[in-house]
């Protein structure tokens, strides 16, 4: 029986590779991306059920996306919160938050909440990273300060937030399997600045998007996956203490609810 699979960040990299593999397995794949041209190219490559555009630096667009998905799909079997990126210099969104923590954490937090009833009995797979070792989110300051901004620290903090969200979602939503994973150091159009992007795109020693996408697909269907777990490859790992502390997970959840206006 085919599953309904929603993938954010599906217009390139890991998301697109996973979308192609889900579709090849017979799943009904829904692509979500930010850039119209890339979404159009992705739709030409993937036999997708549907395609939606949303910019996660605008929470109203996330709310609109959730409304459209709710109207179209009474059940979602897999939500792959894969969209994310690094912001080269400090930027505050129109919602009032630092752009990295909003795009990588608050937006998927909001989307998952708004789809929560559609996901009952299903699975949420959050693309995190070993970069979570680089920083911890501050629930008391999601806006950040320009003078203290570091792109790598902000990215690491947002990836730690992905893991903390996974931990707390597993506790609060026992009817949904919530998983976070490190896809490897993936060769893709990633990073901030021309040199960094060239490194990530062409370094031959990095993991291919296809291999990382295959891991996402496996975790989305693996029957023995541990809810609340963090996977590096196919192996369950213990993340850094700041990304696994239950009290920190609860504090971030409460702050994220206040920031996005959801409850649950």
Image (tube, rainbow, N blue to C red):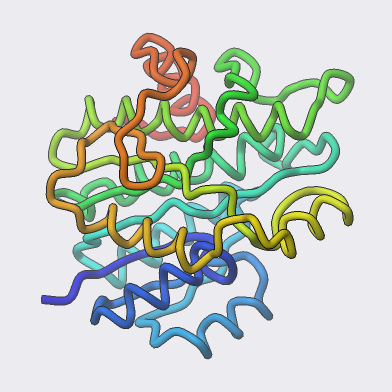
Camera-nearest residue between 49 and 154: 154
> In the displayed image of the protein, which residue is found farthest to the top?
247
Q: Position of residue 82 (x, y in %)?
A: 48, 53
Q: Position of residue 247 (x, y in %)?
A: 37, 9
Residue pictured at 36% horizontal, 64% vertical: 6
Quarter of the rendering occupied by the N terminus: bottom left
Q: Position of residue 161 (x, y in %)?
A: 50, 29
The reply, left or right, for residue 201 in relation to residue 183 is right
Quarter of the rendering occupied by the C terminus: top left
The quarter of the picture where residue 179 lies is: top left
State the count of labels: 0
Camera-nearest residue between 7 and 107: 7
Residue pictured at 53% horizontal, 64% vertical: 209
The reply, left or right, for residue 209 in relation to residue 113 is right
The quarter of the picture where residue 70 lies is: bottom left
The quarter of the picture where residue 172 lies is: top left
The reply, left or right, for residue 24 in relation to residue 37 is left
Q: Position of residue 77 (x, y in %)?
A: 22, 60
> In the displayed image of the protein, which residue is found farthest to the front?
205
| Placement of 156 over or under 99, stated as above or below | above
Residue pictured at 27% horizontal, 31% vertical: 228
| Placement of 21 over or under 149, stated as above or below | below
The reply, left or right, for residue 33 in relation to residue 96 is left
Residue pictured at 60% horizontal, 16% vertical: 138
């Amino acid at each position: 029986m085919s599953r309904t699979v929603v993938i954010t960040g599906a217009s390139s990299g890991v998301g697109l590779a996973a979308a192609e593999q889900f579709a090849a397995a017979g799943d009904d794949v829904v692509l979500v991306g930010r850039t119209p041209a890339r979404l159009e190219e992705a739709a030409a490559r993937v036999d997708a059920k549907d395609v939606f555009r949303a910019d996660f630096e605008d929470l109203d667009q996330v709310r609109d996306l959730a409304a459209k998905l709710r109207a179209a799909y009474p059940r979602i079997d897999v939500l792959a919160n894969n969209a994310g990126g690094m912001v080269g210099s400090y930027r505050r969104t129109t919602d009032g938050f630092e752009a990295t923590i909003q795009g990588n954490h608050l937006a998927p937090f909001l989307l998952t909440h708004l789809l929560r009833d559609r996901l009952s009995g299903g699975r949420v797979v959050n693309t995190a990273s070993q970069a979570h070792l680089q920083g911890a989110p501050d629930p008391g300051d999601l806006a950040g300060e320009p003078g203290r901004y570091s792109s790598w620290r902000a990215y690491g903090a947002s990836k730690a937030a992905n893991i903390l969200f996974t931990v707390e979602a597993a506790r609060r939503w026992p009817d949904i399997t919530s998983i976070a994973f490190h896809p490897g150091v993936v060769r893709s159009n990633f990073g901030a600045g021309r040199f960094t992007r060239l490194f990530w795109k062409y370094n031959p020693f990095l993991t291919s998007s296809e291999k990382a996408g295959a891991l996402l697909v496996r975790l989305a269907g693996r029957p023995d996956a541990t809810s609340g777990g963090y996977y590096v490859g196919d192996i369950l790992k213990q993340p850094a203490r700041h990304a696994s502390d239950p009290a920190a997970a609860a504090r971030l959840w409460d702050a994220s609810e206040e920031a996005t206006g959801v409850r649950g």
